[in-house]
Image (cartoon, helix red, strand yellow):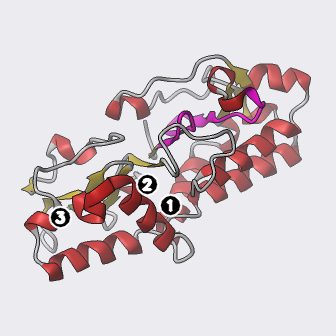
Amino acid sequence: MVFPFDHPLRSKVDNNWHITKQKVADFFTPDQQAMIREIFLKMHSPEYAERVMKQVEHDAGKGGFGASAVALFGEPGVGKFEFVLSGRHVTRRCDGDSVEGAAFGGPIFYGHAALSDEEAPDHPGNIYWYQALRANEVFKMLDGKQRDMALLGDARGEHGTETVALTGKKSGLPGIPVSELTRDQKEHVHKVMADLLAPFRKQDADEAMKLVKANGFDNLHMAFYKNQDIGKDGVWDVWQIEGPAMVWYFRGEPHVHTWVHIRQHA
């Protein structure tokens, strides 16, 4: 479970995977398991930490949090170092700022299948559905021409780490450029970004927003996808925010999968 810092596994992300064969509950002592749990909780804001833990335990099934797997890259106190935890609907990293110019230490994933894998249009019990409702508030603010730019057909596919490949482009990305929005619309996009970051600890949220702004907030594009609309209710379950060096892809159909990658440079 210990690898060199530059091992390719350190940058992998997926919606349901185990970074090593050793499950937390089977491989680690009770004290070590408690430490891993504490690390995970502290990667999240006090407001959301317990809710996120319950989500991970629920989605993991019978094994709960103990069904996840961890890996360590590098050696603490000597050089660059990163801790990675993975499982169903979870990939999190803790790097102690070893990875320069990368929020969260690299790409992360979060998701939730609350009551079933096939969720209802209002996603009852899903702890992350609030993020889609906030994003849909932006869509409601758009005029007809803006909606034509923002509302697209099919979203990107999910292909592991490739899902969050960064393009470096400032124009030509899917959806409506933030530069095309009015001031109040831009302010609302900014508020949505803050809400997306709310589950994470303040240091990571602040770093992520700093990197997004460094690449130009006006260079962000926001897209909504009509072909995966649960219940055909016009509340878009699938949407994304993408910029030159960031992707935040929220796929809420049939349940929530969210892919995040934010860097200083693509």
Coordinates of residue 35 in the picture (x, y in percent): 24, 78
Q: Is residue 11 magenta?
A: no
Report the residue marked by disc 1.
207
Residue 85, label in figure:
none
Asked if one can make out residue 185 in the rendered structure from this viewpoint, the answer is yes
Q: Which image quarter: residue 8?
A: top left
Q: In the rendered image, which quarter contains the C terminus?
A: top left
Q: Which element carries disc 1, helix, strand or loop? A: helix
The CA distance from mark 1 to mark 3 is: 29 Å
Q: Which image quarter: residue 94?
A: bottom left
Residue at horizontal 63 percent and vertical 40 percent from the top: 120
Position of residue 162 relative to residue 40, above or below, is above
Q: Amino acid at mark 3?
A: Val
Report the residue marked by disc 3.
24
Q: Residues within 10 Å of mark 1 (few under 14, many from 20)?
A: some
Asked if one can make out residue 91 in the rendered structure from this viewpoint, the answer is no
Region in magenta: 232-258
Report the residue marked by disc 2.
103
Q: Is residue 66 left or right of residue 160?
A: left
Is tag 1's residue or tag 3's residue first in the polypeptide sequence?
Answer: 3
The CA distance from mark 3 to mark 2 is: 25 Å
Q: Which element carries disc 2, helix, strand or loop? A: helix
Coordinates of residue 31 in the picture (x, y in percent): 16, 83
Q: Amino acid at mark 2?
A: Ala
Q: In the rendered image, which quarter contains the N terminus?
A: bottom left
Marks 2 and 1 close (CB-CB < 8 Å): yes
Q: Residues within 10 Å of mark 2 (few under 14, many from 20)?
A: many
